[in-house]
Amino acid sequence: MAEQNCLVANDWICGEYLRSRSHELTDAVVQHIWITAVSVVIGLLVAFPLALLARRGRHFAGPVLGLTTVLYTVPSLAMFSLLLPLFGLSAALVVTGLVLYSLTILVRNILAGLEAVPQEAREAAKGMGYGPARLLWEVELPLALPALMAGLRIATVSTVALTTVGSLVGKGGLGNLIEDALPSFFKAQVLTASVLCVLLAVVADLLLLGVQRLLTPWTRISGRPAPAAKAG
């Protein structure tokens, strides 16, 4: 009875809210994950060729990095307004905006990773007969993975947060719940949706960190202490 009264009392923590709105919460979480995942994957697919273009020289790097930086500075409301005539009030509108926001992080980290590849590794691969494509995929990209994955983690966490802005057009996942609860100041819904959003960001970051450790085993630092020398 007390738990049911927490809805009437508008408490911040309310077990009855979680039970009675579980389906609504699940739908919001699924939509949030879907929009975030699609946006990050498309952003990565777009950022990779842009990073390859940028590393061809200053004539390309300046415009590419400048454009992606300018896109990141555009306020979300203005970005969605500019994209509205093209996509209407749809999930594509939110995904496109999130992709554009992710580019500045992804392009810069991919470019930094590729430029950090030792020249000696490139020369050795060329001496073994590696062509440009094989050099990129078998030498440069694996060595650039730590920087690439770091950028991917930052972009993913940022996208989880920015997805809530999609509530402006009704496609914001957990952001929809927050926006719906604010006019009446429904505390349990605001807190629950906010906490779930933070948890999604933390879980996504930990999963990507795990993937990074699996893909880059050479970057792991052993925690075992060096054996002590025996006294003569």
Image (cartoon, grey):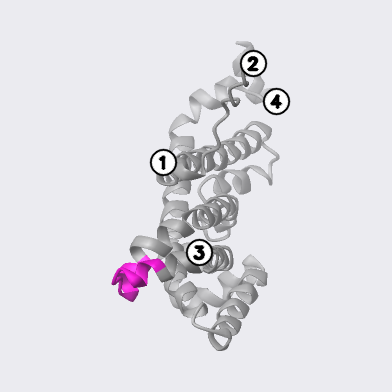
Q: What amino acid is at disc 4? A: Asp
The residue that mark 3 highlights is 117
**In this rendering, would 193 be left or right of 125?**
right
Q: Please check the rendered image and state whether residue 101 is part of the magenta-colored stretch, yes or no.
A: no
Sequence order check, earlier mark of 4 and 2? 4
Q: What is the secondary structure assignment of the residue under circle 2?
A: loop
Q: Earlier in the sequence, mark 3 or mark 4?
A: 4
Dot placed on the residue nearer the N-terminal end, 3 or 1: 3
Q: Mark 1 or mark 2, which has the lower sequence index?
A: 1
- The tag earlier along the polypeptide, 3 or 2, is 3
Q: Is residue 125 magenta?
A: yes
Residue under label 1: 214
Give the percent coordinates (x, y) of residue 48. 44, 68
Which range is magenta? Answer: 124-136
**Which amino acid type corresponds to the residue marked 2 in the rendered image?**
Gly
Q: Which residue is mark 4?
A: 11
State the CA–CA distance, disc 1 to disc 2.
42 Å
Q: Quadrant of residue 13?
A: top right
Residue depicted at 60% across the width and 50% down the height: 161
Q: Which residue is mark 2?
A: 232
